[in-house]
Amino acid sequence: MSSLPRPLFLFAGVVLAFTAVGFGQSWGVSLSIVNLCLISAVMALGLNMQWGYAGLINLGSMGFAALGGLAGVLVSKAPVAESWSVGGGNLGLSVLMVIATVIVALVGRRFMARGALRNIVTALIILVGYFLARAFFDPAVEAIESVDGAKTGYLGGAGMPIIFSWIVGGAFAGAAAWIIGKIALGLRTDYFAIATLGISEIILAVIKNEDWLSRGVKNVTGLSRPVPYEIDLQTSPWFLDLMTWLGGDPVSGSTIFVKLCYAVLFIGVLLILIWLLERALNSPWGRMMRAIRDNEHAAEAMGKNVTRRHLQIFVLGAAVVGVAGAMLTTLDGQFTPGSYNPLRFTFVIWVMVIVGGSGNNWGSVLGAFIIWFIWIEAEPAGLWLMNLVTTGLDESDPLRLHLLRSAPHMRVIVMGLVLLLVLRFSPKGLMPEVRRR
């Protein structure tokens, strides 16, 4: 099969699969899966930049996605005036203490000679600054979290349209990646992978436990939307006229219309990213990154700053994952830190990149659609299969009940089977990287 028909054939199969779900289950279900596939495709593109372009093993995509989700709260929710009045002043002073500590430490290190004395003085400055900051921070947090904890108990956000959080989420994730990269990129590859996983867990632990920031595990619901609400559509004359002309039900039609609006927004983001990443990949910068990936020592001998380029691609890839995290929070309409787990936001994303083809942007998109479709549909398919297999058994038969209860595990089994088959018969992915000479 030539290089052109194969991608078309694979994407046509994806379209047929979603069409089958639309006719077999419902178009609402099909569009819900499409939207999540689009968001997963953006995450996969971010990871593909790090692994496919530069060979960096990042196991911390969960933390970057959570920072993107946090941006949705800090951008879109209205500020809680009472919380700001009782704790905003002390919180601001604690931030100033942190900034002052960093400045004093940097200035002190600049004017002191290298040696043990400079390190001891720096450590003392940081220690004193820490306790000074906590002296203002702890009372501020206690006061903020005591403000109607059942409903608020946090500072709120900027009260802006939530679509701006997509940019802010990318900035949050990119800033965190810069700090992580400055610390951990000097480690060996396997240690770097472990470090990113551990730091992502730290990020999530902070988000879960700092209630003043985003209510922690109490969750933030009712986030604003960039698309219309179903109830508003159901009372809009133009939409009712459209449903009458189409012969559809306004209630189900409004749900489908909203999901289509989300799909248009997400497709726009995905296409912009694809366009930018394809241009970058085929530019001298992209060829340089692949050269560093293939042989770091040779690239370094040619005068390339490998660590700096690794930091650059690590920050850019994390920023893309942060954008996807903000998009997911926008789609859900809520921020639930407890839902972030390594299986969903690290392992599954890695499988998407591997199955689709690392180093190929379109391959990552294909892998995202295939893997997320399987992840969602494997459970109902498994339930149907278990019902079929146990048709001849009594409804109270222990074996039948056990098999039906085990149906949800089919998604993990099928996921592993798909990964094994692809690695066996197409080890470079369904759409391998195109190497141009």
Image (cartoon, rainbow, N blue to C red):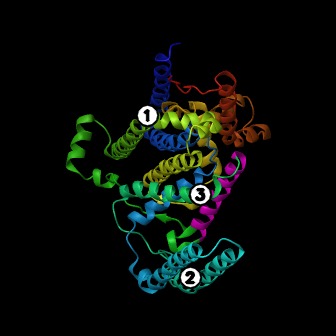
Observer able to see residue 352: no
Which numbered disc flags the more N-terminal residue, 3 or 2? 2
> Which residue is located at x 52 percent, y 25 percent?
434
Q: Is residue 150 above or below residue 254?
A: below
Image quadrant where residue 394 sits? top right
- Label 1 with label 2: CB-CB less than 8 Å: no
Q: Tell me how many marks there are.
A: 3
* Coordinates of residue 174 in the picture (x, y in percent): 50, 55
Q: Is residue 270 above or below residue 308?
A: above
Q: Give the class, few, some or many, for how many residues have Cα within 10 Å of label 3's Cα (few <14, many ≥20).
A: few
Q: Secondary structure at mark 1?
A: loop
- Label 3 with label 1: CB-CB less than 8 Å: no
Check if residue 204 falls in the magenta segment. Answer: yes
Observer able to see residue 297: yes
Q: Which mark is residue 182?
A: 3
Outermost residue to the right: 398
Which numbered disc flags the more N-terminal residue, 1 or 2? 2
Find the magenta span and give its range.
189-209
Q: Considering depth in this image, is 383 or 431 the residue closer to the camera?
A: 431
Amino acid type of the residue tagged 3 in the rendering:
Lys
Q: Secondary structure at mark 3?
A: helix
* Coordinates of residue 226 in the picture (x, y in percent): 34, 53
Q: Give the class, few, some or many, for how many residues have Cα within 10 Å of label 1's Cα (few <14, many ≥20).
A: few
Check if residue 317 falls in the magenta segment. Answer: no
Amino acid type of the residue tagged 1 in the rendering:
Ser
- Mark 1 highlights which residue? 283
> Which residue is located at x 46 percent, y 40 percent?
38
Q: Secondary structure at mark 2?
A: helix
Amino acid type of the residue tagged 2 in the rendering:
Ala
- Mark 2 highlights which residue? 133
Q: Considering depth in this image, is 215 or 25 the residue closer to the camera?
A: 215
